[in-house]
Image (spheres, grey):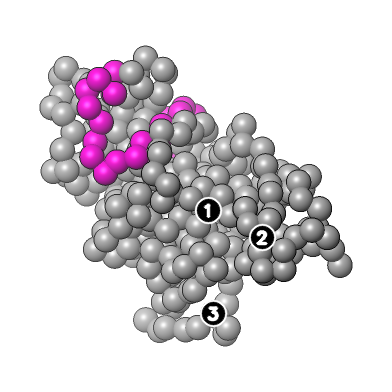
Amino acid sequence: MGRTSLENMESAKIGIIGGSGLYQMPELSDVKEVEIDTPFGRPSDAFFLGTLENQRVAFLPRHGRGHRFTPTEVPFRANIYAMKLLGVDRILSASAVGSLQEQYAPLDMVIPDQFFDRTRARARESTFFGEGIVSHVSFAHPVCDELGDVLEQSCKVADVKAHRRGTYICMEGPAFSTKAESEVYRSWGMDVIGMTNLQEAKLAREAEICYATLALVTDYDCWHPGHEAVTADVVFEYLTKNVRNAQLIIKEAVRNLGGQDRTCKCNSALKNAIFTAPNLWPEETQKKLEAIIRKYAVA
């Protein structure tokens, strides 16, 4: 495995973010380990730039190798901005989740199409904007439907039950829910619960990158009377079983995306969303955001 610099590396059109337990893609070939600096700091880890199903992809372990970042500590802005610097325009994100409804059983896969935010830490930055440039992107439909459809189709390669659509509620963590919280989330109609993907989805939208989540169900949180409350041991046991299926599904999704043009609206999410007139953009902020706003700058 080689190591290269940003100046002389090649690009990748597809990004893969691996969640808890998914720290590598064994089928990657011709792999280069790429370390990237961004205006928002260093990403969670080096990127693994390699070939998968004849496509160049960029793989990043969300929590770092060895699982070094809590959900709150994950450098979300650096991770997504680095994807943009690499030329990524689609992100497939894997995430371990708890089930809040009977129909989503452990070892099932869910491809949610909605998010609900229950995070609260100031450290969880979920926008690139500010410091003199204001943007309000549309987030009514936070997941790219085209990419979600590809994930759903790709689930057929694995022996799993897949569920298309549903709401992923993103909690702060790192502790799991209390039973009272879990029951409230169920009463709200939430489907699965996790700790990371809401920020990624928001930032990907601002970066005009298509984004979809493959949610790996590991447990019934703590609400189900027929199952013990979620523990780290339970989560890791089911993650181990689920990870290989997730790798197969993502591999198939990459194959299905090969040569497929984007026809969704994700690649123009910032059009009419930046409220600050370009002639008023502070030079320093414009330089900081250059990778995502360059096409909207005054010539």
Q: Quadrant of residue 281?
A: bottom right
Vertical side of 224 occupied by 134: above or below: below
What residue range appears in magenta?
154-183
Return the disc, 3 or 2, that comes first in the chain's sequence. Answer: 3
Q: Quadrant of residue 272?
A: top right
Secondary structure at numbered mark 1: strand
The amino acid type, in three-letter code, at marker 3 is Leu
Disc 2 designates what residue? 292
Which residue does the image show at 68% across and 56% down from the upper left?
Answer: 132
Left or right: 146, with 31 as reference point: right
Count residues near mark 2 (Cα–Cα under 10 Å), then give few for <14, some for 14-19, many for 20+: some
Secondary structure at numbered mark 3: helix
Q: Nearer the viewer, mark 1 or mark 3?
A: 3
Disc 1 designates what residue? 91
User: CA gap, disc 1 to disc 3?
Assistant: 20 Å
Disc 3 designates what residue? 6
Vertical side of 274 occupied by 189: above or below: above
- Residue 165, given in percent of the width and then of the height, sits at 49, 29
Return the disc, 1 or 2, that comes first in the chain's sequence. Answer: 1
Q: Nearer the viewer, mark 3 or mark 2?
A: 2
- Residue 207, given in percent of the width and then of the height, sits at 62, 54
Examine the structure image and report whether residue 155 is included in the region drawn in magenta: yes
Examine the structure image and report whether residue 288 is included in the region drawn in magenta: no
Vertical side of 252 occupied by 187: above or below: above
